[in-house]
Image: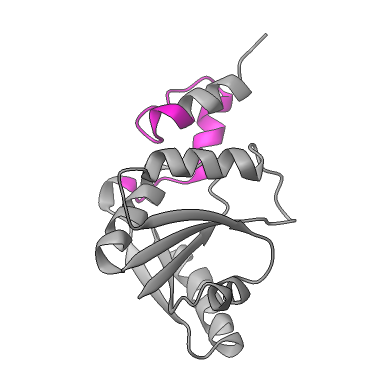
């Protein structure tokens, strides 16, 4: 069974990696899809995010990384996926994700959404939080992989 794990991943965090790793044990293949959201201004372009994710998931043989601009259900059909994988941190995530799951079901009845609760140690973590901490010179090494922390630090380096 193929699962799609869509998101902006700007940047990928240890919370995302937690969901990807656990998903890779549940599904034959997990495709991490960098979704291009016109309502967001990313820190990193799509190519950089794809490379950051590829580097982070390289030990996971059944995980691949791709990029798509459009409806996730369209991409899932194109890749013959049966599952959308989503992570949940807090109750507010559930409300938003449940609404999206119901919407996706109206667009693709054969596509299921599987929710994984993020491990407790990452329940507070978001990409926005990482960027905010880094912007004010806070330590982010415990929140993102080392190569991602270096990329973020370069973006916020004071000259």
For the image shown, how many numbered marks are present on the structure? 0
Residue at the farthest top position? 159
Q: Which segment is the magenta one?
A: 122-148
Q: Does the magenta-highlighted stretch encompass residue 79?
A: no
| Quadrant (top left, top right, bottom left, bottom right) of the C terminus | top right
The residue closer to the viewer here, 142 or 31, is: 31
Quarter holding residue 91: bottom left
Question: Compared to 132, does 2 lie above or below?
Answer: below
Q: Residue at x 62, y 42 (%)?
A: 47
Q: Residue at x 33, y 65 (%)?
A: 116
In the rendered view, would you say 49 is above or below 150? Answer: below
Report whether 43 appears left or right of 120: right
Looking at the image, residue 16 sits to the left or right of residue 117; the answer is: right
Place residue 100 in its image quadrant. Answer: bottom right
* For residue 132, above or below residue 62: above
Taking depth in this image into account, of 103 and 53 the one nearest to the observer is: 53
The N terminus - image quarter: bottom left
Residue at screen point 41% across, 35% down: 144
Q: Residue 22 falls in which quadrant of the image? A: bottom left
Residue located 34% across and 58% down the image = 62
**Is 136 in the magenta?**
yes
Please determine whether, in this image, residue 109 is positioned above or below residue 10.
below
Q: Position of residue 104 (x, y in %)?
A: 56, 81
Q: Position of residue 41 (x, y in %)?
A: 71, 45
């Amino acid at each position: 069974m193929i699962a799609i794990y869509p998101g902006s991943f700007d940047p990928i965090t240890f919370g995302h990696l937690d969901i990807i790793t656990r998903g890779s044990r549940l599904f034959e293949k997990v495709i991490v899809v960098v979704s291009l959201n016109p309502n967001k201004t990313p820190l990193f372009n799509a190519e950089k995010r794809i490379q950051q994710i590829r580097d982070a998931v390289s030990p996971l043989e059944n995980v691949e990384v791709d990029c798509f601009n459009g409806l996730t259900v369209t991409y899932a059909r194109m890749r013959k996926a049966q599952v959308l994988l989503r992570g949940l941190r807090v109750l507010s995530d559930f409300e938003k994700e449940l609404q999206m799951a119901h919407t996706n079901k109206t667009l693709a009845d054969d596509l299921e959404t599987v929710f994984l609760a993020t491990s407790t140690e990452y329940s507070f973590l978001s990409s926005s939080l990482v960027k905010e901490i880094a912007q004010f010179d806070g330590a982010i090494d415990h929140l993102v992989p080392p190569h991602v922390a270096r990329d973020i630090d370069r973006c916020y380096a004071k000259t």
